[in-house]
Amino acid sequence: MNPLSRFATAPPEGEQLCGVDPSPLGEVAQRAGGGLALSFPPTYLPTMTSTSRFGAKICGLSTPESVAAAVAGGAAYVGFVFFARSPRNLDPEAAARLAAPLRQSPVKTVAVTVNPDDALIDRLMATLKPDLIQAHGKETPARVREIAQRSGAGVIKAFSVSSAADVDQARAFDGVAQHLMFDARPIDVNGEGSALPGGTGARFDWSLLEGRRFSRPHFLAGGLDPWNVAEAIRASGAPLVDVSSGVERGPGLKDPALITAFLDAVKRV
């Protein structure tokens, strides 16, 4: 059974999709050459409208069901992780198969990397062809610029935050990266430098972002879930939010029901 077929309906009358113009989807899921294909009306576009002020990214997807839930819920971005130590790690070819149904959709695909080398960038662009590359390591402004030029994709530069000074460092990247992302600083519990850079469920003081303005919309990440995302948006003022572990039933195991609940919570803010 096509895992997208149960989502191939228009949203309920009067309901606004998160970050997306609520044009009827119609029959968007269909079999095509043994694979999955989606077709969207040309007016089904990601927007930041007055009735849908915030956009959401669902990160670390690894199954067709989780991708389908993100699309149906109105996510503006979906993320696939390429970092060996992450429980959400994929090879680029597997991610490309998951993203294939989105080729004609307005949903932006994001390749999440940590200090990526040129070989990985080239492989991602040859397979997944992401709209954006997330740089979640110690990349410099010069390296972010190189990634953008080499790939032709936009770059999301992520920062680990525990103080106002961590937010201040992002200024050097404003205008270099297409988007900035502020995530919680990971805790290295064993002192061996093995802490994951993201997707840990850790959070930081959201008020550190209050009143901050950047040239492009920025993301808030770290410890978000369906129960606290509304509070996080209000406290931080961030126009975009990113979730990974907060919509999982176990490490790397996305729960479609939690994805739906998270996106519904964002829509209600």
Image (cartoon, helix red, strand yellow):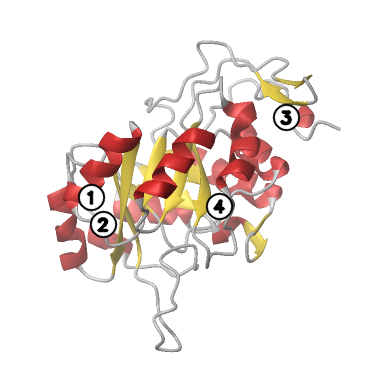
Residue denoted by label 3: 7
How far is disc 3 from disc 2 in space, using C-alphas? 38 Å
Which numbered circle lies on residue 72? none
Q: Are the residues flagged by discs 1 and 2 in contact, CB closer than 8 Å?
A: yes
Which numbered circle lies on residue 60? 4
For the N terminus, which image quadrant? top right
Tell me which numbered mark, 2 or 4, is placed earlier along the sequence. 4
Tell me which numbered mark, 3 or 4, is placed earlier along the sequence. 3
Residue denoted by label 1: 143
Tell me which numbered mark, 3 or 1, is placed earlier along the sequence. 3
**Mark in front: 3 vs 1:** 1
Label 2: element kind: loop
Q: Is residue 109 left or right of residue 155?
A: right
What is the crowding at mark 3: few (fewer than 14 residues within 10 Å), some, or many (at least 20)? Answer: some
Residue 227 position within the rendered picture, expressed as x and y whole percent measured from the top left: 54, 58
Label 4: element kind: loop
Q: Are the residues flagged by discs 3 and 4 in contact, CB closer than 8 Å?
A: no
Residue denoted by label 2: 139
How far is disc 3 from disc 1 in space, using C-alphas? 40 Å
Q: Residue at coordinates 74% horizontally, 31% vertically from top-left?
A: 4
Label 1: element kind: helix
Q: Which quadrant holds residue 252?
A: bottom right
Seen in the picture, residue 61 relative to 22 is either above or below; the reply is: below
As shown in the figure, which amino acid type bears the numbered disc 4?
Answer: Gly
Q: Is residue 71 left or right of residue 213?
A: right
How far is disc 4 from disc 1 in space, using C-alphas? 24 Å
Q: Residue at coordinates 37% horizontally, 28% vertically from top-left?
A: 48
Along the line of sight, which residue is nearer the eye, 136 or 165? Answer: 136
Q: Residue at coordinates 42% horizontally, 53% vertically from top-left?
A: 113
Seen in the picture, residue 5 relative to 212 is either above or below; the reply is: above
Residue 84 position within the rendered picture, expressed as x and y whole percent measured from the top left: 53, 63
